[in-house]
Amino acid sequence: GDCRMKTALDRTPGGVKRPLRARRGALLSLGALAALTAVLWLARAHLDKAHFALAYLLVVLAGSAVAGHRAGLVLAATSFVLFDWFFLPPYNTLSIANPADWLVLVAYLIAAIFAAEVVRRLQRQAQVASERGAELDRLATVRAQNAVFTSVSHDLRTPLTTIKALADELARGDHRAAVIEEEADRLNRMVGDLLELSRVQSG
């Protein structure tokens, strides 16, 4: 049961394994980061540093949610370099002219890493909740089946008791009635065994 649950959790609803989905998500996220950088670069003269930081944070959050924690960290580090290279003067270098921009850059990196970590924790909590829900559903199904089985077994004992009583009355000198009584006893023992098995399975 645990193996089947793990296999199910390793797959998405479409049947694609999570590692494959994560790789695709990482490539899409990097593509989105590149496209966003191009758009921001074209509008660089009309935007402020806060706009660049917020736009990049959105990509980090989306990439972490789609491709996982590691992809989020890669996106955070990559966007950190792109932020410095394209949007902090002097442009197209990794040096910074205004010392205050170091604070902006470092604050962005911390915020991006923190965002990726928050997404990871939320996803982990969702996974744990999903696993617990699946286990609870399985237990509820087993208990429902056992309850139905127990009810049916008890209902079977009533006609068996009646058959046995009638066979006992007719058994005087009639071999067939004795056979009916013996078979009723055997069926009664089988029902008892099934009831015991149901109790064991339900704990």
Image (cartoon, rainbow, N blue to C red):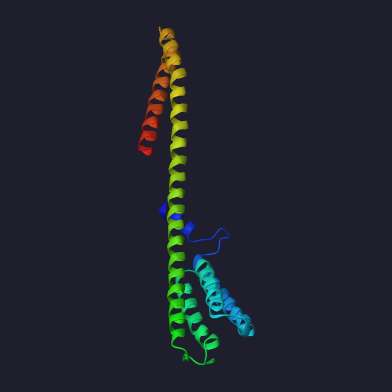
* Figure quadrant of the C terminus: top left
x and y percentages locating residue 192 in the rendered image = 38, 27
Question: What is the count of numbered marks?
Answer: 0
- Compared to residue 119, the image places residue 3 above or below, namely above
- Compared to residue 14, the image places residue 182 above or below, namely above
Question: Residue 5 or 102: which is nearer the viewer?
Answer: 102
Question: Residue 155 or 192: which is nearer the viewer?
Answer: 155
Question: Residue 160 or 94: which is nearer the viewer?
Answer: 94
Residue at x-position 44% and y-position 77%? 107
- Compared to residue 36, the image places residue 186 above or below, namely above
x and y percentages locating residue 184 in the rendered image = 42, 20
Which quarter of the picture shows residue 194?
top left
Question: Residue 77 or 203: which is nearer the viewer?
Answer: 77
x and y percentages locating residue 183 in the rendered image = 42, 21
x and y percentages locating residue 30 in the rendered image = 55, 78
